Image (spheres, rainbow, N blue to C red):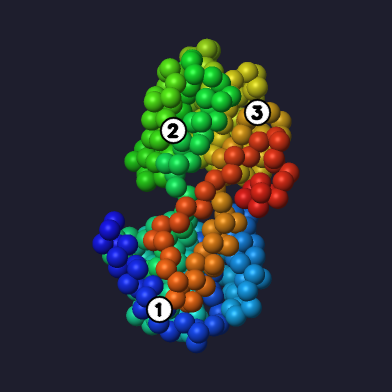
Amino acid sequence: MQSLKTLMMASVFAFGAGAGVQAGEIAVIVKATSSNFWQNVNLGAQAAIEAQSEHTLSFDGPTTESAVADQVNLVENAINRGVSGIVLAPSDPEALVPTVRRAYEAGIPVVIVDSALGEAAEGTYQAFLSTDNCAAGEEVAKRMIDEAGTEGKVAIMSYVAGVGSEIGRVGCFSDYIKANSDMQIVGPFYSQSQMANALNQTTDILAANPDLVGIFGANEPTAVGMGRALVQSGKAGQLVALGFDGNEDLQQFVRDGVLKATAVQGSFAMGEMGVATVIDVLAGKKVDSFINTGVVMVDQDNIDTDEAQNVLY
């Protein structure tokens, strides 16, 4: 990690040397333009551009997140037209590495958001902005203890074992609960990010553990399936249910009291902070190699506030 940070800082100084002549287009290229999540990234990027006058903004991406080759072409096109900087949410950790390296060789700073690039890209981009999933898991655990107390059973409905975000999010949730309460953890159970799996698993867990005091659905499809199981079983509102992510289904669960809260990643912040970081690099300023874009705990009290609306999708 230290060597990565050193390489990144060296890159910052290299790009900073030309500051003052690099005003121009900042290209924001996301995984898919059809998603509300990525449109929220665009709104954040627009906010950052409106706060200054030197740079302009373009926003693009393929129609689906699986169209990796299309995203590679969009980045190549941005390099070819000589943009000043790029904010990129890579759809594939390996396929975008050669293109990002080409941007680096062309003197175009790149800031990565949401998903990490492969190790071969080390030193070719200036910062990585994403959710600190361990910190997010701890935040959900704190809310669980605040709402449910320090005793009883808490079930964890997870998604894919071994995925980086899952290790941090669920692992740190579990560690915090164990260290700060006498709660007994049931699970985790893995839905493979399939809503139907999560619904069936949660139904079974609720039947086998009628004394649960809390339950955590650790990503969007899992939390949706969990919420539907709570409603169908008649258990909604009878135990503390917390989700993760913020689509329309989860928002409605919060409004209806099925979920006490859901932790929503800062999509708006990814766009705003991503563009601001590129601008800082172009101005010759030092930037951190990793920037946590955080989560917002959305509940009935704040769901209609600007803070929540900026991250819900």
Select label 1 or label 2 by which is in front. Answer: 1
Q: Residue at x 45, y 56 (%)?
A: 291
Q: Which residue is the extreme one toward the bottom?
A: 21
Residue 140 at x, y = what percent? 51, 34
Q: Determine if residue 15 is in view.
A: yes
Q: What amino acid is labelled 2 in the image?
A: Phe
Residue 234 at x, y = what percent? 65, 19
Label 3 CA crowd tier, 10 Å (few <14, some 14–19, many 20+) = many
Q: What amino acid is labelled 3 in the image?
A: Val
- Dot placed on the residue nearer the N-terminal end, 3 or 2: 2
Say which residue label 1 marks: 15
Q: What amino acid is labelled 1 in the image?
A: Phe
Quadrant of the snapshot with the N terminus: bottom left
Q: Is residue 213 left or right of residue 125?
A: right
How many marks the image carries: the answer is 3
Q: Which residue is the extreme one toward the left?
A: 3
- Mark 3–mark 1 Cα distance, whole angstroms, equals 50 Å
Q: Residue at x 57, y 56 (%)?
A: 269
Q: Is residue 159 above or below residue 24?
A: above
Say which residue label 2 marks: 173
- Mark 1–mark 2 Cα distance, whole angstroms, equals 39 Å
Say which residue label 3 marks: 258
Label 3 secondary element: loop
